[in-house]
Amino acid sequence: MLATGITVNLFAQSGDKVFDISDNILFTRSFYIDFGNSNKMKIDLSDISDLERVGNIDSLLKIFLNDIAFLKDSLIDPLTSKRIDYITDAHNRKKIRFQQYLPKSSSFLINKGETVTLRTMQDTINMIGVIPDPPKPTTKLSATATRYYHFEFYLNNIEELAGYMNGILRQKFTTLQADVKSKWHIVQGTGSWYMIKDPAITAEAVAGYRPGTSNDQLTGYYSANIQNYKNYFVPSASIGIKLSIVNRARTYKWEPTITWEPNFLFSRDSTGKLKTYRNDFLTFMYEQGGIKDHDATKGFSYSAAFSLGYLINRKGDFFEKNTFRFGAGKIQFYKTSVEPLLYFNNFFKGVTPGIRITQSIFQ
């Protein structure tokens, strides 16, 4: 006999890129549907409006089951876990991969003197397809880029899929489409959220938003800096706001930033006592370049940058009045950057070179 005591298992992909999600496919929303008894479905969408085109999920699954009918004999083994990858391209060509996994160990359950084999891994169905004639997107997406859906089923037995083709899934999709903007509550003790209208629908963020896929955003900017001015060592801090403007394909962004930057210089007075002098710069920074992994919250893959600061608060005799600080280009190491500087005043008089090292914080 076979008993089930199954936990979700996300199988690792092999090196066959044909069945992987391409790097240029962007999903902005992700949801989970809990069917009970550990059976689940994950939904990834390029745009929430795409639910209009995949709402008839029962028909899609019927086609899928018909296409894998030739695998029927391979699905019989009750002890192995199975994975089916099912990819449909823009020309409606289908690619199917079937994988079967033997358990790495044997598990048994003894109940009332009877020993049965215990199955411990789930079956996985991975479906990727093109959204036909996609509706107008609700988020900033490329109007010409192909949009996709990605469905993953985690089932105790792959044959249980047919049991959800009785309108249950279609109703879930209808609820998502109609009520995605309704109230969501956090699942206590987790980072997940559930929809009040249907608690079986969950997401990792309210309304299923995925990090790094939102539109243009305004965020805080904080950094610690050190630079030299003439023969002085000058630590400073930067506090400001940064605007990120992202293109529709999530491949390029523009980031203007304005910061207030107190600079601290040290010198001894006439009595030999060490004193601290704060000189404040108002700085405008600008950077533009490529985005890593279509995630606007990550750093640049390549970029061009410059900065221009103006002395707004002068203490001591270190800086001349109307001093500017100009930087162009930088070398980036994760969140640490090195930038060449020029200090000048009164239309490039009294030019002084410098080097600035910046450690970004929470940006």
Image (cartoon, grey):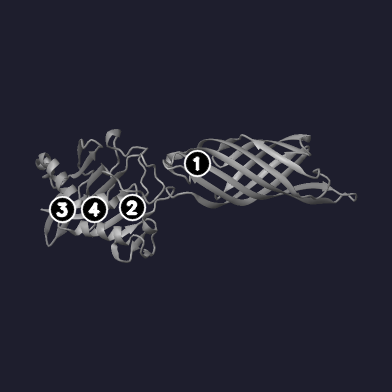
- Earlier in the chain: of badge 3 and badge 2, it is 2
Q: Are marks 2 and 1 in contact (CB under 8 Å)?
A: no
Which mark's residue is nearer the viewer, 3 or 4? 4
Q: Which residue is mark 3?
A: 160
Q: Which residue is mark 2?
A: 48
From what the image shows, is residue 37 above or below residue 287? below
Which mark's residue is nearer the viewer, 3 or 2? 2
Q: Are marks 3 and 4 in contact (CB under 8 Å)?
A: no
- Earlier in the chain: of badge 1 and badge 3, it is 3
Q: Position of residue 8 (x, y in %)?
A: 27, 52
Q: Position of residue 300 (x, y in %)?
A: 51, 39
Left/right of residue 330 with respect to residue 149 in the rendered view:
right
- Earlier in the chain: of badge 4 and badge 2, it is 2
- Earlier in the chain: of badge 4 and badge 1, it is 4
Q: CA distance from mark 4 to mark 2?
A: 11 Å
Badge 3 density bin: few <14, some 14–19, many ≥20, Cα 10 Å: few
Q: CA distance from mark 2 to mark 1?
A: 23 Å
- Earlier in the chain: of badge 3 and badge 4, it is 4
Badge 1 density bin: few <14, some 14–19, many ≥20, Cα 10 Å: many
Q: Which residue is mark 1?
A: 253
Q: Which residue is mark 4?
A: 55
Q: Give the farthest residue toward the right.
A: 270
Kindly state the secondary structure of the residue where label 3 is placed.
Answer: helix
The three-letter amino acid code for the residue at tag 1 is: Lys
Residue 149 in view of the camera? yes
Q: CA distance from mark 3 to mark 2?
A: 27 Å
- Which residue appears at 10% of the width and 53% of the height? 1
The three-letter amino acid code for the residue at tag 2 is: Ile
Left/right of residue 38 with respect to residue 316 in the rendered view:
left
Q: CA distance from mark 4 to mark 1?
A: 33 Å
